Image: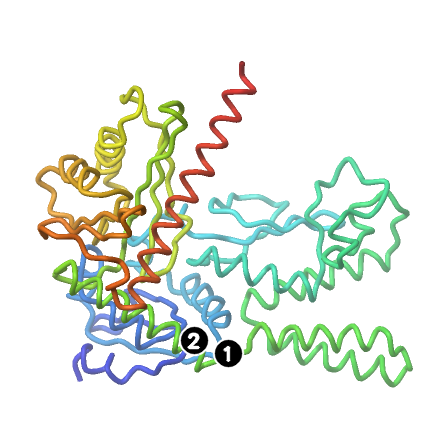
Amino acid sequence: MSIKDKIKKAPNEPGVYTFKNSRGGILYIGKAANLKSRLKSYTGRGWKEDMLRKAKSVSWEVLSSDVAALIREAELIKRNKPKYNFIMRDDKRYAYVAFTKNTFPRMYITHQPRESKNEIYIGPFTDVTALRRVLKLLRRAFPYCTCPPSPKHKRPCVNAQIGKCLGFCCSDVKNTKQNEKTYKANLHAIKKVLTGKSRSLLGTLEKRMVTLSKARKYESAALIRNQLGSLERIFAHSPHLKRDIAEEREKALESLKEICKLSHFPERIEGYDISHHQGASTVASMVVFENGMPAKDEYRKFNIKTVKGVDDFASMTEVLSRRLKHDEWAMPDLIIVDGGKGQLSAARKALGKKHIPLASLAKREEELYIDGRRDPIKLKQLPPPLLNLVTHLRDESHRFAITFHRKQRRRLVTER
């Protein structure tokens, strides 16, 4: 069976997938909230085109949720070190969870693990946004401290007051062996989840809950019962909801491909916006959507350097010209700039001989201009899934530009 035919049989469920060569060697491992939707996006472009030429088979493993897929993917990448996972993005783009070896260990996300006897690392994770979400959910069940180890607070921190920190690890109170044991038990539970040992953790917690109940320590048993409930919710999967979201995203991207007359599926879309105050401190934002979703690790900020006064057209030309010099960044399948016909022309000038599909979104007129098409399209005429996608991208690029501009203005005021 060909890879294309095999993909047609993929389920609309979360999981991990593996491409292998003719000798059974693993070329690439990925995760998906919807396996069928994700695998259908493999149309061949850049590293994918080379990988797909060598791939002779694809297989998948269905999991209970996208959280389970995130963790399983990290486990498989660490074990197999597939060639094309590291061609796709260098090590700095992967995320690791670091644990220090203090009395009350700290935990943080890093892109650059280092050789250290004082820290251990779990990863690599390819989706930082999903990883942050998982840690946020785990912290509710297994509180841990994010305050610096010194100086200590006189009182428990705000997180301790809302149940996200145990309190004794960051406040200036007498330490006890029981405090240390409780804190390390929470960190141990988080490590088990992140290394794919959640079943083992669930079994351990259930046994402890029964033991505590028999000993009539009902308050402690109730705490563990709540932890078990939290873990079940983290790994729960709502297949109908996930399927609806994935299908809507897929419809939006298919519509975009058709309207912009793209030769392939628009896997990577870049959005640009210019922000300034009466021509001062002009900045630009670049946001990236991958498969219809924001990829915030790929966002970039630019200070406009060569343009004086108010000139959005020249600013757009500058930012795109500078962006194209970054060969280490993945090339977009489509660029959407903020503005009308003028911004579209400025963007085309910057692209020069590079054949990158281009469009612009005019906020005031609520119109979509497409390079090579004479008349714009009214946004209200777009299919609802596509309208949601392009307005989301427009709003995100505007938000990112405005936030950066405000920071720059505050910095300039402070320096005066």
Q: Image quadrant of residue 31?
A: bottom left
Q: Residue at x 35, y 24 (%)?
A: 279
**Dot 1 corresponds to which residue?**
237
Q: Nearer the viewer, residue 75 or 209?
A: 209
Q: Nearer the viewer, residue 186 or 78?
A: 186
Instruction: Locate the C terminus and report the quarter of the image it occupies.
Output: top right
**Residue at the top extreme of this rendering:** 416
**Dot 2 corresponds to which residue?**
242
Counting residues from the N terminus, which is met first, the one under dot 1 or under dot 2? 1
Q: Is residue 256 above or below residue 170?
A: below
Three-letter code, disc 2: Lys
Q: Residue at x 44, y 58 (%)?
A: 127
For mark 1, give the secondary structure. Answer: loop
Q: Are marks 1 and 2 in contact (CB under 8 Å)?
A: yes
Residue 337 percent location from the top left of the image: 26, 44
Q: Nearer the viewer, residue 209 or 333?
A: 333
Q: Nearer the viewer, residue 394 or 217?
A: 394
Instruction: Locate the N terminus and report the quarter of the image it occupies.
Output: bottom left
